[in-house]
């Protein structure tokens, strides 16, 4: 996603298996679902978009498993909102999918004014049956 960027993200929100022709479109749909879960404050739904052994790598120490939901809830509580992920590329390889793109969000700036943050984003997803879940999520 992520300060978050992000974002990807499927599972209980129901993302079908990817076909090569629709890979980028399907990946963007999944990114939009991640954004929707985060922006609406649905941290439980957001957590289900990751594998149980997933790792999120923000600035600082990596966050794993159940800590992912808490990490993003903490960002939301600090005023980081309006997250948007744009998928630029989606590359399938066996049961993995590598997604790259851009993310942006607003958050607290100097003097309490809202500031826009943005950067690059990478997600690695793993196929689990007919669904994809995020295994690795990082951004800068």
Image: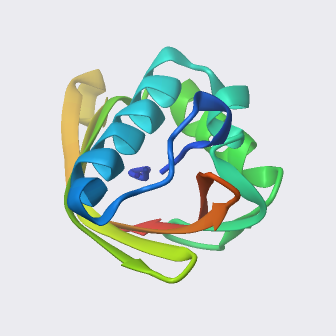
Nearer to us in this view, 70 or 45: 45
The answer to which quarter of the image holds residue 61 is bottom right
Answer whether residue 108 is visible to the viewer in this image.
no
The answer to which quarter of the image holds residue 64 is bottom right
Left of 33 or right of it: where is 90?
A: left
Q: Is residue 121 above or below residue 6?
A: below
Residue that lies at the very extreme toward the bottom in this rendered image: 93
Answer whether residue 50 is visible to the viewer in this image.
yes
Nearer to us in this view, 110 or 87: 87
Who's the residue at 62% across and 21% down the image? 42
Q: In this view, does 62 lie above or below 32?
A: below
Who's the residue at 53% across and 29% down the image? 76
Residue 120 lies, in percent from the top left, at: 24, 66
Residue 66 lies, in percent from the top left, at: 83, 50
Residue that lies at the very extreme toward the top in this rendered image: 40
Who's the residue at 57% across and 33% down the image? 14
């Amino acid at each position: 996603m992520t300060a978050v960027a992000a974002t990807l993200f499927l599972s209980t929100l129901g993302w079908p298996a990817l076909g090569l022709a629709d890979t980028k479109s399907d990946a963007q749909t999944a990114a939009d679902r991640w954004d929707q879960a985060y922006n609406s404050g649905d941290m439980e739904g957001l957590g289900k978009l990751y594998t149980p052994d997933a790792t999120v790598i923000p600035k600082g120490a990596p966050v794993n498993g159940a800590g992912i939901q808490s990490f993003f809830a903490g960002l939301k509580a600090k005023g980081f909102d309006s997250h948007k992920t744009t998928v630029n590329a989606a590359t399938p390889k066996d049961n993995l999918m590598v997604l790259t793109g851009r993310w942006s969000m607003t958050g607290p700036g100097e003097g309490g004014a809202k500031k826009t943050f943005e950067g690059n984003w990478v997600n690695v997803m793993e196929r689990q049956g007919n669904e994809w879940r995020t295994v690795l999520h990082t951004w800068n």
